[in-house]
Image (cartoon, grey):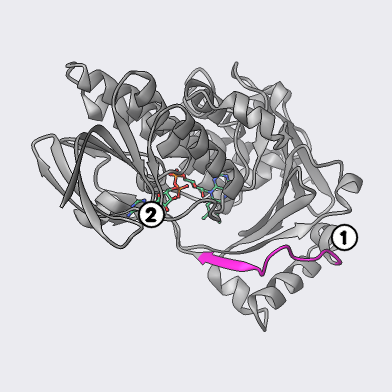
């Protein structure tokens, strides 16, 4: 069998893997990416958050991304019937990036993979990891190659950035169910000739359709826009026909989407996804670390996926380099705890969205501008800034504030 030797093997050429590989390569280690499929490939997750620019910057990807001309994103707009709340990232509480991009992921991920290859990291497509054995921190990974053969890759460390592939959790039985209920989406890309009537395309729109059903509207620079409805799987069963029939009917049942998309053509046949929330027993072990979606994916409502993927890829890569240089790393304290700080902050916001308390806050009539700035920081992905009370007390602050808003509304109504 063919044998290769590297310092670090990265599994998966999504944003998490490309960011990690670039940072490890810059530190002078011999790193390789293996990627199961051929790029470009479709993946959902098209709205980025400003916080992910820090990781893309450290990886050296920003100049190439700028040249590509993706749609710039300056904020997020929430719509519920006639109510509109617009968050402008330049008003956020935390210092840092005020903008990012809205990207068709096939193009975005391919560009990152091309860039990391240009920097000197071999990226092998159509190369699937099928087995791993560990000997202390050293490992031997078996991969299938595009010609139908197989080979072994010996590494001093593995970064598992395999996203929904979940390579190490599956091989070593580390998968655990999430504490969030299963949800479903029906989505497509649409032509969007009406976008300028809606004061876009330089932000995304989140539509609160029903208490637990919402939609994303993410315009791209090519004139097309991604639209998807998300919620309880039973919601979609009430609409008869094919996936396309269902999406068309749901679009027409919402005032905003009906006005903007009822006559718009699909760019591809609508698709569904279901049950994406999953987690794992542990994020690291002797000779490996999990990054991105392999650690935990919550829910798409706040576009947190790529930010958590790139931030964890960045953090893991920095620690891998320090460990390979001989430093003792406390992975629990230096990797898991900071990663979970971000994940758990978003988890509180996701839960508060679905139980309605965050929607009451976002759409409340008398908003404090300071509170709005603090929530805006979370929506921009700055979930590690514990100077922000809406990060530091994420598990209690939303429920308390929603209660105050409700009492105020009742007192105005004279109840
Ligand atoms: P991925 O992008 O999934 O990349 C992993 C790569 O690993 C893949 O290319 C895969 O082919 C490869 N791989 C898998 N198995 C193997 C193997 N055995 N061997 C080799 N390679 C392998 N996030 C956002 O930020 N914004 C959004 O608007 C957003 N919307 C979403 C909407 C929905 C409905 C869902 C479900 C998710 C959404 N997300 C969003 C989340 C986003 O899709 C992910 O968080 C993000 O893609 C994670 O990046 P990653 O690099 O960890 O993994």
Specify whether tag 2 is near ligand 1 (CB below 8 Å).
yes
Residue in the foreground of this view, choosing between 388 and 289: 289
Helix, strand, or loop for circle 1? Answer: helix
Residue at image position (69%, 74%) is 244
Quadrant of the rendered image containing residue 390: top right
Residue in the foreground of this view, choosing between 217 and 352: 217
- Magenta segment boundaries in residue numbering: 263-273
Looking at this view, name the residue that lies furthest to the bottom.
241
**Residue 366 located left or right of residue 235:** right
Residue in the foreground of this view, choosing between 61 and 358: 61
From the image, tell me which residue sits under label 2: 36
From the image, tell me which residue sits under label 1: 259
Mark nearer the N terminus (1 vs 2): 2
Residue 81: x, y in percent? Answer: 81, 55
Residue 412: x, y in percent? Answer: 79, 41
Residue at image position (59%, 19%) is 94
Q: Residues within 10 Å of mark 1 (few under 14, many from 20)?
A: few
Residue at image position (80%, 59%) is 257
């Amino acid at each position: 069998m063919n044998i290769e030797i590297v310092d670090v093997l990265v599994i998966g050429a999504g944003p998490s893997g490309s960011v990690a590989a670039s940072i490890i390569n810059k530190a002078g280690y011999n790193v390789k990416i293996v990627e199961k499929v051929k790029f470009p490939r479709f993946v959902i997750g098209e709205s980025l958050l400003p916080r992910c620019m820090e990781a893309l910057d450290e990886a050296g990807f920003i100049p190439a991304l700028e040249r590509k001309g993706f749609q710039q994103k300056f904020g997020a707009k929430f719509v519920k019937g006639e109510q509109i709340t617009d968050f402008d990232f330049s008003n956020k509480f935390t210092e840092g990036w005020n903008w990012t991009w809205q990207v068709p992921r096939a193009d975005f991920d391919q560009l990152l993979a091309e860039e990391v290859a240009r920097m000197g990291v071999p990226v092998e497509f159509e190369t699937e990891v099928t087995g791993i054995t560990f000997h202390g921190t050293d490992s031997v990974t078996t991969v299938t190659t595009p010609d139908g053969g197989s080979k072994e890759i010996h590494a001093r460390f593995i970064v598992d950035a395999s996203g929904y592939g979940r390579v190490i959790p599956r091989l070593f039985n580390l998968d655990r169910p999430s504490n969030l209920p299963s949800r479903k989406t029906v989505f497509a890309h649409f032509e969007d000739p009406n976008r300028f009537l809606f004061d876009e395309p330089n932000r995304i729109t989140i539509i609160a359709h029903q208490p637990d059903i919402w939609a994303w509207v993410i315009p791209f620079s090519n004139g097309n826009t991604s639209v998807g409805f998300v919620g309880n799987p039973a919601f979609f069963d009430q609409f008869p026909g094919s996936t396309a029939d269902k999406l068309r009917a749901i679009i027409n049942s919402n005032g905003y989407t009906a006005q903007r998309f009822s006559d718009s053509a699909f760019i591809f046949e609508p698709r569904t996804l279901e049950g994406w929330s999953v987690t794992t027993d542990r994020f690291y072990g002797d000779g490996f670390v999990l990054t991105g979606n392999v650690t935990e994916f919550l829910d798409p409502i706040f576009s947190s996926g790529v930010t958590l993927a790139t931030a964890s890829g960045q953090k893991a890569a920095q620690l891998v380099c320090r460990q390979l240089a001989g430093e003792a790393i406390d992975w629990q304290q230096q990797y898991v705890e900071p990663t979970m700080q971000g994940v758990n902050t978003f988890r509180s916001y996701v839960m508060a969205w679905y139980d309605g308390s965050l929607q009451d806050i976002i759409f409340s009539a008398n908003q404090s501008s300071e509170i709005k700035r603090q929530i805006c920081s979370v929506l921009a992905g700055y979930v590690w800034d514990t100077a922000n009370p809406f990060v530091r007390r994420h598990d209690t602050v939303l429920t308390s504030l929603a209660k105050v808003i409700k009492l105020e509304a009742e007192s105005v109504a004279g109840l």
